[in-house]
Image (tube, grey):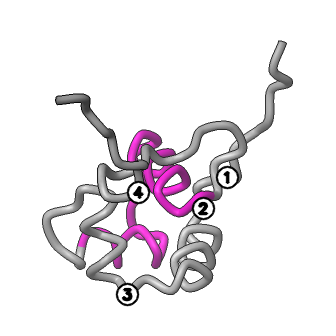
């Protein structure tokens, strides 16, 4: 059984701190989270609006900070497949 690990709270200070730690610009983070503009993420980071829990979890996964899930490997990262002729 996998022990349950609580996700970091999606408060404005945690969101901004994770973005800065990951080295993402506001535009890069907004794109990863699925926002259509940087203004939406800026509003979340300033505390004017709240983040959708799914977007927060997706960002944690994509930055490697999710306690259980990890991002899928891209095809370029996979070992080559050799086929017999």
Mark closest to the chain's N terminus, 3 or 4: 3
Q: How crowded is mark 2: few (under 14 residues within 10 Å), some or many (20 or more)?
A: some
Q: Distance between the residues labelled 4 and 1?
A: 31 Å
Residue under pointer 1 = 9
Which residue is nearer to you in this view: 1 or 56? 1
From the image, state whether disc 3 or disc 4 is nearer to you. 4
Give the magenta range: 40-64
The overriding secondary structure of the stretch rendered in magenta is helix
Left or right side of 8 for 43: left
Mark closest to the chain's N terminus, 4 or 1: 1
* Secondary structure state at the residue bearing disc 4: helix
Residue under pointer 3 = 25
Which residue is nearer to you in this view: 39 or 7? 7
Q: Which mark is residue 77?
A: 4
Q: Which mark is residue 11?
A: 2
* Secondary structure state at the residue bearing disc 1: loop
Q: Does the magenta stretch include residue 56?
A: yes
Mark closest to the chain's N terminus, 2 or 4: 2
């Amino acid at each position: 059984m996998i022990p349950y690990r609580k996700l970091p709270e999606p408060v404005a200070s945690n969101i901004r701190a994770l973005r800065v730690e990951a080295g993402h610009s506001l535009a890069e983070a907004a794109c990863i989270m699925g926002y259509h503009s940087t203004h939406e993420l800026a509003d979340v980071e300033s505390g004017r609006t709240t983040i959708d829990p799914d977007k927060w979890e997706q960002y944690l996964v994509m930055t490697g900070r999710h306690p259980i899930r990890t991002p899928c490997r891209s095809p370029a990262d996979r070992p080559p497949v050799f086929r017999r002729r």
